[in-house]
Image (spheres, helix red, strand yellow):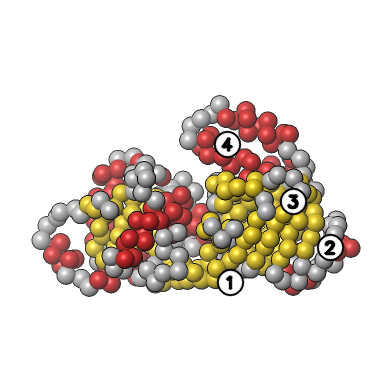
Amino acid sequence: MAKQIFESDPLQEDVVALSNRRRACLLVNPVGGTVARDHGEQVAEIWTHLRAAGIWAEIVETREGEPPGLLASKAVEEGFSMVIACGGDGTVGAVAKGLVGTDCPLGILPLGTYNNFARSLRLPLDVRAACKVLARGRVRRVDVGVANDEHYFFEAVGVGIDAQLFPLGEEIKGGNWRRLWAAAKLAYQAQPARIHFELDLPLSEAYQSGGKRRFKVEQHPYAGDAEHGLDFSAFMLIVANARYYGSGFTVAPDAVLDDGLFNIRIFRNFSKGELLKHFWSISRRRFAHSSKIDTFSAAEVNITAKTDLPFHVDGYQAGQLPLRLRSLRRALKVIA
């Protein structure tokens, strides 16, 4: 790892003398989030805030060809007391992957556009305040999702129209406004898909909509009902680990980060206008209740379809169905 340590005044010696409990690896994405602007000056400011909070940070910039998760794993091997992800959701998620199942906690300095994971953890978005949270060192264990035993995720997995639109959304977010037409055309042409899922809990226990814990198939427009499985037609299915995903959408307001259960939301019988209106509302970090959304909770979900359907993992297209999702309960330590 290419390390960078800022030289300073003699007070630096006091910081160095701190025990290893205060030794942190600060992973910075120089082209992600607000770090990209005035990079050197901002990193120096962050380092100063951390030092004032009693944390000695060795700064490592992520580089092309060096996965942040691998750098985080190396930091664990080198005995750092914490690994701090400095950047947006992409950087935070990439770093966190290297810490799953270890005793080394993840620290977060949320400098992205949406900061979904930080918001789900109720972390402050101000850098100085976030450094104070790291200084307190209160460790919380949170759940991690895994898709097809290969892809870790921290926010959500989506099947259906959002999995198709996410890549275009990232291009538009990056300034390629010409992709707006392609996104609008795709959304206009989209049709509900026939999807099947199997849960590890009986539907009567897993059903959460309306605060009720019972499920009666005759009250819902599903076919092929079994004790643990459903066939349904919907624009999309979202399996959430946390409250927020995508462009700051409050997609799963009831999601709990440490209960070992996913919040599974089926968007059925929506018109395209209704779906757009719903997502406009939750993009403002509001919760828009809809009787057309059915919610379930489970620790394991298996999803299939008769047609080719893509799925995304925290906004990144990761393949097509079939899909197996498992919740790894409290598999990640986070300073929060």
Kindly report which numbered mark, 1 or 3, lies closer to the viewer in this rendering: 3
Q: Which residue is tagged 2?
A: 225
Q: Alpha-carbon neighbours of circle 1 within 10 Å: few (<14), some, or many (≥20)? A: some
- Cα separation, mark 1 vs mark 3, equals 28 Å
Query: Which circle's residue, 1 or 3, is located before the other in the chain?
Result: 1
- Cα separation, mark 3 vs mark 4, equals 23 Å
Secondary structure found at label 4: helix
Q: Which residue is tagged 4?
A: 168
Kindly report which numbered mark, 3 or 4, lies closer to the viewer in this rendering: 3
Residue 279 relative to residue 55: left or right:
right
Residue type at mark 3 is Ala
- Cα separation, mark 1 vs mark 2, equals 27 Å
Whether residue 205 is visible to the viewer of this picture, yes or no, is yes
Residue type at mark 1 is Asp
Q: Which residue is tagged 3?
A: 305
Residue placed farthest to the right in the image? Answer: 218
Query: Which circle's residue, 1 or 4, is located before the other in the chain?
Result: 4
